[in-house]
Image (cartoon, coloured by chain):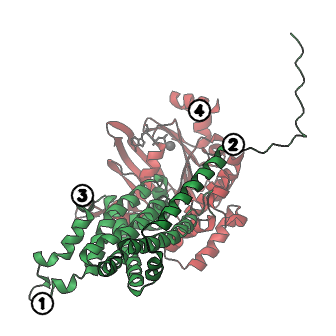
Amino acid sequence: MTGAADHRNPIVSIVALEKHFGAFRVLHHVSLDVFPGEVVCLIGASGSGKTTLLRCINQLAQQDSGAIWVDGELNGFTIANGRLHRRSEREIARQRLATGMVFQRFNLFPHLTALENIVEGPVEVLRRPRAAAAEEVQALLARVGLADKAGHYPAQLSGGQQQRVAIARALAMHPRVMLFDEPTSALDPELVGEVLAVMKELAASGMTMIVVTHELGFAREVADRVVFMDHGRILEQGPAEEVLLRPREARTQAFLSAVLG
Amino acid sequence: MTAPAPLPDISGYSIAPERHWGRWLAVAVILLLLAALGRAFAVGMIEWRYVGAFLTAPAILTGIANTLVMTVATMALGIALGVTTATMRMSPNPVLRGVAVGYVWLFRGTPVILQLLLWFNLALIFPRLGISGVWTVRTVDVMTPMVAAFLGLGINQGAYTSEVVRAGMLAVDTGQYEAAKAIGMTRLLALRRIVLPQAMRVIIPPLGNEFIGMVKLTSLASVIQYTEILHSAQNIYYANSRVIELLIVAAIWYLAVISVLTPLQMLLERHFARGTAGGR
Ligand SMILES: Nc1ncnc2c1ncn2[C@@H]1O[C@H](COP(=O)(O)OP(=O)(O)O)[C@@H](O)[C@H]1O
Ligand SMILES: [Mg+2]
């Protein structure tokens, strides 16, 4: 546990979020503050809206109403003369740089090597010189334990290695917050540990993280806070020990006993 | 119940070669038919020495050079228009989408020979081109057979290529767009750097097909007096009446060009298979 969460200014502030897919309500009055250096684990049954919440935070999805503030900026809109004005695509792309996203299915670029996957953002988006960027990326690859895999294509890497490259790809953009959407769910059981180890190191380094996961051991060990989502709402939240070991809500208890088997 | 018989130990056996009697028979029949066909042409009313003589005649060489130039130029225009149109077609902007749909509808919906004739006869609609009062030119001076063929074939090709490109882009997993956006790319940058390179794997085979088609489609430009190879061959046989010989000369050149293009396509396919099981 990093513990030293800064409780003055949240780095992510979600206010009364609502989202529907057609008539189906995916998110209902979701409000959540995440503070710098904090690790928040989102848990909940499949279909409870965890992925949609992460996608709203980095604007891959748009909420119907409510607001998300990331690093002091309102997602997707500027405020002028008491009205909201939609931001341009370019502005939204810039806002996305504040968050790094790690997908359940890695989504590495298959036509690029591990190194090229990670270098792509710094060079094409941040316009850094390729040589300098490649040097930094080599250091990142070493940090995730893949220094010797720089020239490998994703198809030549195991799932665990691919996910570590994906984490490095997100880190290369120097995000303020890292978002993880079930980063180990698509992995063979023996590969889960190497990805969790990288995430633990990241948490220990002080990175702010929002992690959707079913790895309750990881949540207990690393999370400052565990948030339980149910049918699009936040039903219960608190310190990891409390929510995981002494849940107040019956639904949380039912979910935990189902996951623990 | 009796005890099961022990299974034979096959570790010392070799595999007997298979005999493909059917294949040998087929090859024999095909060779026979080819020999008969070859003989028919050899004794037929063809003066083969004319074929040999005109194969490298200056007018024929100019013709094949023009065919190649027109093929490369129209395909370049077609690919540029095709990629642009496919991108517009997938844009969130309904105006851009509408323009793309309209373009494909118009140019796929009319015969290309008709489009060639329209471009070539543009002067009948607009005698002068330009901005009136500032700068204008006579349309007949601009709309040479070469320009008309380039516009007619290239713009028509763009309509077809856009559908090929769109199919390729649709074949790329949506997770790739999302991963590209997640590292801060705009839609156009994601298309250029992430989606199109992957779509190329799907696009190249049909595009190679279209390229080869264009080598032959340029022959349509002979109707508007563009001196590609068929037009050159015709000009010569109008003078000397060696119709079949000159048509064979043209056929030999078409086959030669296409025989060179096919391995080029395979090289391209291998390049864009980077990172997949097939390529390196
Ligand atoms: N693009 C979409 N269109 C329609 N329904 C969707 C879409 N994305 C998600 N949903 C639905 O929204 C609900 C919540 O999905 P999701 O956020 O992925 O939940 P979780 O990640 O907790 O499993 C699910 O019932 C899912 O079927
Ligand atoms: Mg999910």
Q: Which residue is mark 1?
A: B134
Mark whose residue sits in front, 1 or 4:
1
Which of the 4 quarters of the picture holds residue B84?
A: bottom left
Above or below residue A148? Residue B139 is below
Crowding at label 1, few (<14), some or many (≥20) Cα neighbours within 10 Å?
few
Which mark, by number, is residue B61? none
Of callouts 1 and 3, the N-terminal one: 3
User: Ligand 1 within 8 A of label 3's CB?
Assistant: no
Q: CA distance from mark 1 to mark 3?
A: 36 Å
Q: Which chain is red?
A: A
Q: CA distance from mark 2 to mark 1?
A: 74 Å
Mark whose residue sits in front, 1 or 3:
3
Secondary structure of residue under mark 1: loop
> Which sits in the foreground, B97 or B102?
B102
Q: Which residue is mark 2?
A: A189
> Residue B226 location, x and y as percent?
29, 79
Tell me the chain of label 2: A
Q: Which residue is mark 4?
A: A256
Asked if disc 3 and disc 2 are in contact, CB closer than 8 Å, the reply is no
Above or below residue A25? Residue A194 is below
Of callouts 2 and 4, the N-terminal one: 2
Q: CA distance from mark 1 to mark 4?
A: 79 Å
Q: Which residue is mark 3?
A: B109
Is circle 3 on the same chain as circle 2? Answer: no
Secondary structure of residue under mark 3: loop
Residue located farthest toward the top when viewing the structure as drawn: B1
> Residue B81 location, x and y as percent?
33, 69
